[in-house]
Image (cartoon, grey):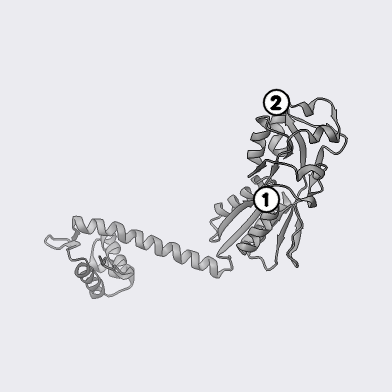
Amino acid sequence: MNHPTITIEQARALDALERRGTFAAAATELHRGHTAILYALKTLEDVLGFAVLDRTGYRTRLTAHGARVLEGCRGLLAAEAELGATVDELRAGWEPSLCVVFDGIVPIEPLLGAVGRLVGERVPTRIDVRGEFLTGVEDAFERMSADLMIAVLPPRTRGLIAVELPALRASLVARHDHPLVRGRQDLRAMRRHLLLTVRGSDPRLELSTSAFEAHSTVHLNDFASKRAAILAGIGYGWLPDPLIAEDLAARKLRRITWTRASHHVFHPRLFHAGHLGPAARRLVAALVDR
């Protein structure tokens, strides 16, 4: 079924007539001739196949059908105005889209805060934020041709510009009643229990548990799932300190003490290929200056 096509000129004419009350006043507002307004509305009725104006009284008024059509016309005019504003902003240099891929171990709140400020300022850039983990971050960065990448692993891609972000501390923890939280443990004791990892691990992280991470039989999808598994007593593992601060304070989780390091400091970096648009530059500055 083919729907009738209403033009912007017809929509403007109907809107102006309803607001101004007469053809002459509508023509003056639109800087058009009186006959041009009459013609636009007559052709509108011809296209629709019914009357939008009641011309029987002293003053021309909208019919019931015309009132419904006017609602749609005003929606069309609002969409045109919004599109015009977007085009003006894009002409001013704002990039059409911005894609950010980040490692899920890095707290997302600063990134979302920076995105929220851009949204609050109604910038026209469409922002896509994707969470991945370890090697999956760079894989997604390349696959999606993303603009920014926040990663804890050094990238394979050459030529990227790196920006240092605040360091992130992590702790090796278990549930409060897990055998490993009772006293100081050695390598043999650690191997007897299940080490939980997020999608496996990577030796480039240089964690103190690297020697037996390959033997982990349970890989979780993200750190929220890993935290839940540790709280359920399934095993032990590394969790970022901001994620478990309340659990440690409530003694639901406890840090493991053993012959090697029970703390680790990740050094996230923000990578990009250069030539950033204004939205990307604002996002980078917000993350670095926090």
Q: Earlier in the sequence, mark 2 or mark 1?
A: 1
Q: Can you name the residue that lies furthest to the left here?
A: 56
Residue 186 location, x and y as percent? 86, 33
Residue 132 location, x and y as percent? 64, 51
Nearer mark to the viewer, of 2 and 1: 1
Q: Secondary structure at mark 1?
A: loop
Q: CA distance from mark 2 to mark 1?
A: 28 Å
Residue at 54% of width from left, 70% of height from top? Answer: 91
Q: Quadrant of the N terminus?
A: bottom left
Q: Are marks 2 and 1 in contact (CB under 8 Å)?
A: no
* Neighbourhood count class around disc 2 (C-alpha, 10 Å): few under 14, some 14–19, many 20 upward: few
Instruction: Inspect the image, locate mark 2, and give the three-letter code of the amino acid beneath it.
Output: Ala
* Neighbourhood count class around disc 1 (C-alpha, 10 Å): few under 14, some 14–19, many 20 upward: many
Residue at 73% of width from left, 24% of height from top? Answer: 177
Q: Observer-nearest residue: 147 or 218? A: 218
Q: Observer-nearest residue: 199 or 140? A: 199
Residue 127 location, x and y as percent? 57, 57
Residue 39 location, x and y as percent? 22, 73
The residue that mark 2 highlights is 250
Residue 194, label in figure: none
State whether residue 200 is above or below residue 54. above
Residue 283 falls in which quadrant of the image? bottom right
- Horizontally, residue 9 falls left or right of residue 146, namely left
The residue that mark 1 highlights is 133
Q: Observer-nearest residue: 194 or 131? A: 194
Instruction: Inspect the image, locate mark 1, and give the three-letter code of the amino acid beneath it.
Output: Phe
Q: Secondary structure at mark 2?
A: loop
Residue at 69% of width from left, 38% of height from top? Answer: 243
